[in-house]
Amino acid sequence: MAERKLLYYLFFLVVLLVFMISCEKFKGDQSIPAYLSIDSIYITTDYNKQGTNSQNITDVWVYVDDEFLGAYELPARFPVLKSGTHSLKLWPGVKKNGIAATRIAYEYYVPIQRNVTLKEDSTSKLGILKSTYQVPAFFPWMEDFENAGISLDTTRRSTAYIDKTPAGSPFTFEGNHSGMVVMDSIHDFFECQTHSEYTIPHSSVFLEMNFNTTNTLTVGVFSYSGISVTQTPILTLNRTNGNWKKIYIDLTTTLNAYQGMTSFRVYMGTFKDADVKESLILFDNFKIVTRKTN
């Protein structure tokens, strides 16, 4: 009998605890949420100054009246425990280094700001939204393979070389040309670097690029001081199975890892994967994105 009373008592405590948690979740004057929905976010660019409008915006970081509400994968529909007219700030989000676990609000895109009227148990549909690059964004290097020359040089060790896809080629991502590297048993090592060195700024630095590869490909930096050079790999890109991908590679930590380094070059390199007879590496729309610093 005593055991039965104890079980009833424990059951009552569990029910009471669940009720208290539910009340805590919706405490305040409003218990019925309004909803916001967003389909996608794209960007527009001034091509001559900012390059391609290709993007891979996967998320939206939401602020309501400057209070962080959360980050949501697009397309998104999410609750907001507010009603009436409120100020929204919607920051485009990306996967840093292409990794789902390192999603960030991309600081070089402009947050979308607007007012919205929220109604309980009703969805405000924002649809497709537009952003662009921040005004302070600075592009020390861009390469779209549309000019006569290429601002990437193969190193002395490389046995494979960079070419352009022919005009009208199905391998071209956009425009008339993309970069192309073919590797086989003779041309089995590829390595290239930017033609110029770039000053390491006192701000974050990202490399944006489109790529499509049947071979793994490592991306990194050469860092320079007055007396030394350090080669540091940052990320290895996996095969894309014939699909073009856009990636945002964070160079910041690596560029600041070694004391006394003042400039850098981006490099890419790889050996031909052993399980393929011939490899095809395609890339396009390289951009170094940072801020100008004195």
Image (cartoon, rainbow, N blue to C red):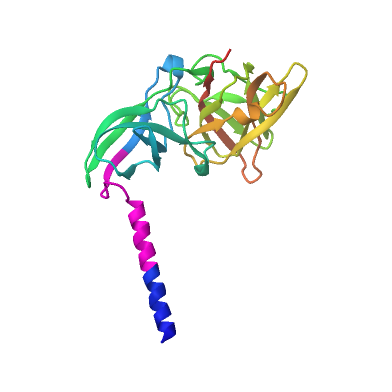
* Residue in front for this viewpoint, 124 or 171: 124
* Residue in front for this viewpoint, 198 or 194: 198
Q: Quadrant of the N terminus?
A: bottom left
* Residue in front for this viewpoint, 245 or 32: 32
Residue at image coords 30%, 47%:
28
Residue at image coords 66%, 44%:
274
Horizontally, residue 291 falls left or right of residue 126, namely right
Horizontally, residue 30 falls left or right of residue 24, namely left
Choose top left, top right, bottom left or bottom right for residue 220.
top right
Horizontally, residue 121 falls left or right of residue 262, namely left
Q: Decide whether residue 30 is among the magenta residues.
A: yes
Q: Position of residue 36 (x, y in %)?
A: 29, 40
Q: Which residues are magenta?
A: 14-38
Residue at image coords 66%, 33%:
233
Q: Residue furthest top?
A: 294
Q: Residue furthest right?
A: 227
Q: Position of residue 214 (x, y in %)?
A: 56, 39
Q: Residue furthest bottom?
A: 1
Q: Position of residue 110 (x, y in %)?
A: 40, 25
Choose top left, top right, bottom left or bottom right for residue 69.
top left
* Total residue callouts: 0
Q: Decide whether residue 185 is among the magenta residues.
A: no
Q: Quadrant of the C terminus?
A: top right
Q: Position of residue 226 (x, y in %)?
A: 75, 16
Residue at image coords 22%, 45%:
120
